[in-house]
Amino acid sequence: MTGTAMAAQPVLQVNDLVVHFPATGAARGAVVHALDGVSFTVARGRSFGIVGESGSGKSTAALAVMRLVPATAGAVMLDGEDFLALRGKALRQARRQIQMIFQDPFSALDRRRAGDLIAEPIRLLEGVSRRAAAERIPPLLSVVGLPPDAASLFPHQFSGGQRQRLCIARALSTQPDLIVCDEAVSALDVAIQAQILNLLKRLQAERGLAYIFISHDLGVVQYVCDDVAVMYLGQIVERAPARVFFSRPRHPYSWSLISAAVPAGASRDALRRRHLVRGEPPSPIDLPPGCRFAARCPFAVDRCRREEPALHAVAPGHVAACHRIGEIEPPVFHTAEPVLAQRCEDAG
């Protein structure tokens, strides 16, 4: 494959990904619809954000892409190969190209020394000697802002931010093309969040990394991501370039998410009165007919409760799944300069 073709090839392409789990307890015998037909593409060197409430399926999507939960159907194409179909040596080689940073750096690390934790994926996935793996540890510590002697320390000797830097070093150890960040800064205080986000952006610029960024914090997603998908009850209901999404979203659920995140000001109360939804989503075991958001949507009509909307183009590169697009005037959000961006700039 030529360099031009490689540049054009997306690092990840997810097609109609489905994850169903057998229900337990009183619902034994039923099916939990964790993901239903999720599709998206992540381009090289770009960040793809997935947002939504707890239970929307965003973390399940990340775990299924990583093959940490089994997919029921669909395809995950990693560097042009069907990642879900790989086995044995081919799977180990492919895993070098996709790594993950988990939410909680306190539970993501065990009681081994930091150097051993970083060396483990190198040895397992590349089959190199202990000595060869050890030689790669000091540069990895340096690039994430940790001193060389950190390799001999145990995780409990690090602060929360230092532990997450250690997790980032471990994710970088196999020189991946793509890193999945599942709520990677949500367990950190706001000042440390800004430092870690700046580190991730610098590493992306230096190494051409692609990120999938799972987060409930829209300020984080706006600061980091180039493209955004909104998930609701196992489905993507809107997908757009981040700049477009945060200024002119088209799905009522997206309006609610952004209204909840707008900083205090003259427009916030008006936005929340009209667009902030209340109540709980339906059960993923007993899904309603029609649009899954209809029971909570202030703009739903009978058609919404009968017919499930499909994703369709509303602008170049922008798709949404709503029957009433074009009938309801969307709000215009003025969130081009969120508070988080200033906080990250102050953190350097």
Image (cartoon, rainbow, N blue to C red):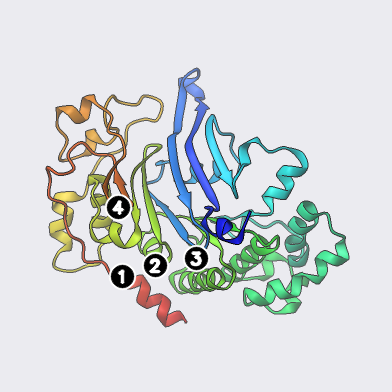
Q: Secondary structure at mark 3?
A: loop
Which residue lies at the image location 80% right of the left edge and 56% below the top edge? 123
Of marks 1 and 3, which one's residue comes earlier in the chain? 3
Q: What is the C-alpha distance between the residues marked 1 and 2?
A: 8 Å
Which residue lies at the image location 68% right of the left edge and 77% below the top edge? 142
User: Where is mark 3, residue-wise?
Assistant: 188
Of marks 2 and 3, which one's residue comes earlier in the chain? 3
Q: Nearer the viewer, mark 1 or mark 4?
A: 4
Specify the amino acid type for callout 3.
Leu
Asked if residue 170 is positioned above or below residue 40 in the image, the reply reads below
CB under 8 Å between callouts 1 and 2? yes
User: Where is mark 4, residue-wise?
Assistant: 316
- Return the x and y of residue 187 as percentages of the image width and height: 50, 61
Of marks 1 and 4, which one's residue comes earlier in the chain? 4
Q: What is the C-alpha distance between the residues marked 2 and 3?
A: 16 Å
Which residue lies at the image location 64% right of the left edge and 60% below the top edge? 171
Specify the amino acid type for callout 1.
Pro
